[in-house]
Amino acid sequence: MTLFCTWTPSQNRSKSCTVIIIILSSLTVITGVIMADYNLSSLGQDLQLTSPTTSEAHVLVINTGGTIGMTLHDNVLAPKPNAFVQSLRKLPILHDESYAICGSDNTLVLPMNKDNKRIIYTVMEYSPLLDSSNMTTDDWSQIGKDIEKNYQNFDGFVILHGTDTMAYTASALSFMCEHLGKPIILTGSQVPIYQVRTDGIDNLLGALLIAGQFVIPEVCLYFHNKLYRGNRVTKVDNRSFNAFSSPNLAPLANAAIDITINWDTVLRANTTAKFQVSTELNSNVGLLKLFPGITTATVRAFLQPPMQGVVLETYGSGNAPDNRPDLLEELKKATDAGVIIINCTQCLRGTVSMSYATGKVLIDAGVITGGDMTSEAALSKLCYVLAKKELSLDTKKKLMAQNLRGELSLDFADTKLCLSDSRFIQVIAQSLHISCKEELAAIRDALTPPLACAAAKIGDIEALEALKEMGSNLCLEDYDGRTPLHVAACEGHLNAVNYLLSHGATVYAKDRYGDTPLCNAVHYRHRDIVELLRQTRAHFSQDRLEELGRELCSLAASGDLEGLEIWSLAGADLMKPGYTGQTAIEVARAVGKHDVADWLSKLLRNKSESGGGMDDM
Ligand SMILES: NC(=O)C[C@H](N)C(=O)O
């Protein structure tokens, strides 16, 4: 691993061509060294307890209603309760009868995909099912609560929802879900799933496949083969299957023959804080669209208490009449009284910019620029921010102007350098005589994982930092599905783990053996890393229950107290039986490992007294 000596703090960290060419020419060698250093074959043997060829992902589907599950009554469409799951069961593309799974009647399984992965999904149906025109902020809170309650048990979430207000709900959930680490994907359809020419099957299938296969830590909306950031969309067509548009941000993924994720655009986690849902929302908000000749009386009436936050839809690049002192006076009175007013454009595409005198008057009236936010995003952001009682009015205003969840484009000055623009990639491209964008992207994707994993292996934060500065995605996987976080967790580099968690790494990444960084840290007994990962809400996945019991019994049989302690620290349920049906405590007693048996019984007693259960594995 001499490669990364070029980036040690004592030396010049400039990304000079020479250094980069050395890196490139060493790549083949590095890959070989990395393979040897990870010792993956032995790691796999020890940790891989299920079939190496098949893995399962679990997705929770929350069915809130919408056209997807509607039928005709008196010639109009309305939701049909308790019928959705039965009809999915009859569709082989959405349910594989031959794959026996234990679970409730609401649990279904997709046919095996081409990566030998099974997506098992459980449908939770709301009662009543709603046409989304009937939704309120209380429904957003309910969805948020259900996600929070089930967060630990699923790899991803799909929310079935009517299209009419889907952009509002997606935007609201994006703000409510704080420190999100798993995908939440809203979808629905334009034609009910019960009809022959429906878009419901494709939309549901696409959303399930993405939620079960990719760790995209965002609230998204999937429709007509595209995955969008949820707070960037707006419904633009009520007759086409292509109902949504994300005018100011390219899709996060395209589903064609392959599903291609645009990882450069996907948000990356940047905190070790726990996931939580802020379900408190403020409903004293409104949406006011300017039109030529709008009366002052209308504006005044609209801004009366209890109104606390308003999205003002203005003309063009954020303009309002500057020859209407009466109207501007009403706006100024409201902002002086503490109403937060956000300026969003009526145009579908573009941003609010202060290029006209007619725009500047709004700033003078205390109106905040909404940049390129959609009205849906701005309105739901107001509901979220205004509900934060602990914050001052000033802080709330600042938050409204800030980019919280990718809803707002940054100024060019703040835009981070992209790897495809960087000198690093350009030099490599030149030396390989590459000029087209696609080939450039392919090189970037090939280089980043081994370089970042090599840096993680030796805990070289300087090197990780240098890679990040070039715009690299530090959570890209290598050929074995292993991320830099897996490697740092194996090697016990706490600082590197901390750094990676703060710069986009996800604790939910699974390598080809189905192992997460938490599994690796437990296996190599790095207590401090287990603690940090747990603090970031890492947990074992549901498909490893059987193995846990076996591992615990074997530790108990060999009197390995330290091993059991670390499993307990990682949140495993120490009462899981092994394949003989005996639990670890029973095994310890049977083989005379009394210190282990005593420790286990004391631990279990303490847990039951404190009322705190252990996590399932
Ligand atoms: N396509 C749809 O889902 C429209 C329906 N009215 C709804 O929003 O619930």
Image (spheres, rainbow, N blue to C red):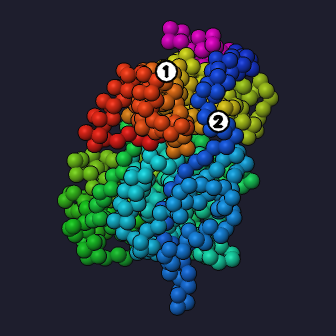
Residue 463, above or below 50: above
Q: Mark 1 points at which residue?
A: 558
Which x, y percent locates residue 567?
A: 44, 30
| Secondary structure of the residue carrying numbered label 1 | loop
Q: Along the line of sight, which residue is nearer the eye, 193 or 354? A: 193
Pointer 2 local density, CA inside 10 Å: few below 14, some 14–19, many at least 20: some
Q: Along the line of sight, which residue is nearer the eye, 182 or 320? A: 182
User: What residue span does the magenta drawing correspond to?
Assistant: 1-19
Which x, y percent locates residue 269?
A: 47, 39
Quadrant of the rendered structure where residue 224 is?
A: bottom right
Residue 249, above or below 135: above
- Report how far apart the C-alphas of labels 1 and 2 lie in the structure: 29 Å
Q: Along the line of sight, which residue is nearer the eye, 303 or 141? A: 141
**Identity, as a three-letter code, of the amino acid under mark 2:** Arg
How many numbered marks are there?
2
Taking the spot 22% from the left edge, 51% from the top edge, the residue there is: 389
| Secondary structure of the residue carrying numbered label 2 | loop
